Amino acid sequence: MNDRVMPPADMPDTAAPLIGAGMQRVESALKVRGEARYAYEMDAATLGVTTEPLVGVMVLSTIARGRITATRTATAQAMPGVRLIMTADNAPAQAPWGPLVAKDRFARAQPVLRGTDVHYYGEPVALVVADTLEEARAAAMAVDVRYDRLPHDVLLDAARATEPEFLNGFKPAKTEFGAFDTSYAGSEIRVEAIYETPHQNHAQMEPHATTAMWQGDTLILHTSAQNLVSIRNGIAATLQISPHRVRVISPYVGGGFGGKLPYFADAILAGLAARSLGKPVKVGMTRPQMFSATTHRTATRQTLRIGADRSGRLRAISHDALSHCASFDNFVEDTTTITRGLYRADAIRTTAHLNHLDLPRSDSMRSPGDAVGMIGLECAMDEVAHATGIDPVELRLLNDTPDDLTAHKPFSSRHLKECLEEGARRFEWAARNPLPGQTREGEWLIGMGMACAMRYNLLKPCQALAHLDVGGNLTVQLAMTDPGTGTQTILTQIAAAAMGLSPTQVHVEMGDTAYPPAPGSGGSFGAESAGSAVLRACENLRELLLQACVADERSPLHGLPREQLHLGGGNIHAGNRHESLSALMERAFPHGVDAHGQIEADAASLKWSQASFGTHFVEVAVSAVTGETRVRRMLGVFACGRILNRRTARSQLLGGMVWGVSNALHEENAPDPRTGQFMAHDLANYHVSTHADMPEMDVVMIAEDEPVSNPLHIKGLGEVGICGAPAAIGNAIFNATGIRVRSFPITPDQLLPHLPAVTV
Ligand code: MOS
């Protein structure tokens, strides 16, 4: 199937206890003890300066669109501790908003306080810097901003939509396989449905925060970010300085989920204020500020049309998705991506529409595109199953495909069938009554639903440096991030396995642009990109050591063929001869030895479509009295290539499923059309699922080898867990009640009018 080099023969031996094992997170003790420093926790001591950082608080706009006519700062300026008030009147020059021309939208210039125009409710319009947070906050409340309002436009409206050229990731906006109109018209069963999903907000446990200081001409930013190299370039572009004069440091990140792929006003304002004042400045967002001054997941309106034979063979699928981006931006949610590749059909058509709205920027949120797009696709598939009378699992099996039809490529590995069969068996799916609304327990209507999961796989260019000291301790460095996912841990495992060392001898240093460039964490590409670069660096290091060993006349292994040598347990072996690594190091590399490694997708691997797959199975109970839905059981079965760490992999998949429950039942943020403001701006009003909402949950990872994507044989799994999960819940609610809710989340008010009368 491929001509890729497998991991070296000596890796599996030493790797066996390490790769796949559920090693505990290497930084967990530091985090539990409060010793892991987050960006906002930097102080004089940790910055190595003599005065504590000054504190900046942002002032946000209170109109959605219009112009600032005056910013009155005299009162605030006179308040205690105030050092600086920065507004559009006095903000230093910055580059204009960067157009999305290059392939990296996070490296664009994003000026702040860039003029008097207001683009959305909650846009930063001033920064107040004072000695303390309390002083800055008090003065920020005294800044008096006057506006001329203009009419705003905050609601999706298909009638005024435009057709974008590209979707997120520069995917084409339209794809066409086969002849949709003919195939659909000729279908015996036709389902046409409109699914709607709401705006959703990030509210990471650690809000966006930056501590900035200048060392001469160089800006040092401790900021909470997923994607250090891109934002370093973007911040440098904004400030119109060389990227070499910006260093971004972010070793610990309290949650990212795509919301920390871009940088935000906290980083730019802290950098500008620190330069103006000649002192370190920190700027953090409050929880309410997080709901507007960052990015969110766009609402979507999706039109699905699926045609099938009575036998369940799909004839035609079409998926059109309307989404929004900010008035000044051009992000397009890639809602239809999975529809392009999940099923076999005679014809598949995907199209996109876009509204530019006076709302905050829409951008990535966990599994952008697919998390919402699979709601439309997988609920519509359930409608096809119901219309044809074919079991939903059987329908998926019937339309499984080894090829990605619209991409005209085969899948490198695809075990969807196994996920369907294993899931159905474990969940006892056969016990489900296919007729909706038939299973009752008192006031509770019980139902089961399922959906597939899929997320395309991506390898991004990455580099790493490995250094072995004479004492046998390995240090690995790269500008990678770990937003709580376990990246530092899996990189430790990979390096230890490749070098035959104990994980306690390996130190993975990341989160700093001073290290070799890495793509950061996002798009489920982190583990394979960074992991492969670390593996390559370690392989190169191992090669240096083994070559030195056979070349060294003082070594007992001198002159042996290189292929006979293996590294493991702190020794170099060949048959029954060996020498210790430390002896070799002392002789050959008394000052230690370095090796560099890098990875990028090779042309051969791009001849394949690569994706992770899975299935969700759900049992719900819906109260006929209150309309409340309780998820009772949830099973996810996934095929994501080899698993590096069962514990952190399970956490990622489980977290996606938990978020799926939240998406299905709780999360939404509607803009208030009168003010243009998102109605929820705290976690009291923005509802997310909590522990009490969580059912019995089970995650199964089936054994799979990914043969082409990367030398680790893994696939991304950070996002596939959310894909399809909300649809499975919606489908279970239909099975429980016979009510098909097509507007997510599925709240009690949508169910209540249609539920049967019950006597309790
Ligand atoms: Mo992910 S939403 O691409 O960090």
Image (tube, rainbow, N blue to C red):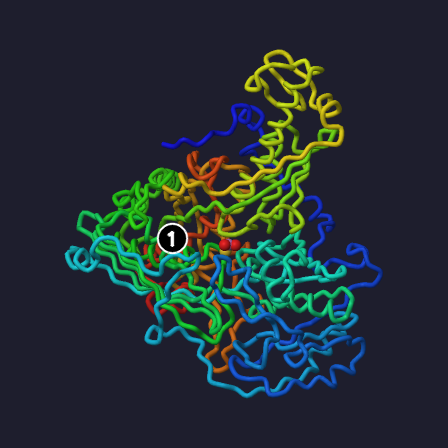
Horizontally, residue 740 falls left or right of residue 663, namely: left
Give the answer, above or below, for where 250 lies relative to 194.
Answer: above
| Residue 121 location, quadrant | bottom right
Residue positioned 80% across, 75% down in the render: 81
Horizontally, residue 51 falls left or right of residue 733, namely: right
Establish whether ligand 1 lies closer than 8 Å to the Cβ of label 1.
no
Direction top: furthest residue: 576
**Amino acid type of disc 1?**
Ala
Foreground residue among 691 and 499: 499
Q: Count the marks: how many? A: 1
Percent x, y of residue 734: 33, 57
Foreground residue among 521 and 272: 272
Residue positioned 60% across, 48% down in the render: 517
**SS class of the residue under badge 1?**
helix
Q: Quadrant of the N terminus?
A: top left
Q: Is any part of residue 627 visible from this angle? A: no
Direction right: furthest residue: 50
Circle 1 crowding by C-alpha within 10 Å: few under 14, some 14–19, many from 20 = many
Give the answer, above or below, for where 333 lies relative to 449.
Answer: below
Foreground residue among 47 and 258: 47
Percent x, y of residue 668: 47, 66
Give the answer, above or below, for where 614 lies relative to 329.
Answer: above
Percent x, y of residue 2: 39, 32
Q: Is any part of residue 120 visible from this angle? A: yes
Percent x, y of residue 441: 38, 54
| Residue 234 location, quadrant | bottom right
Q: Quadrant of the C terminus?
A: bottom left
Foreground residue among 195 and 220: 220
Q: Which residue is mark 1?
A: 728
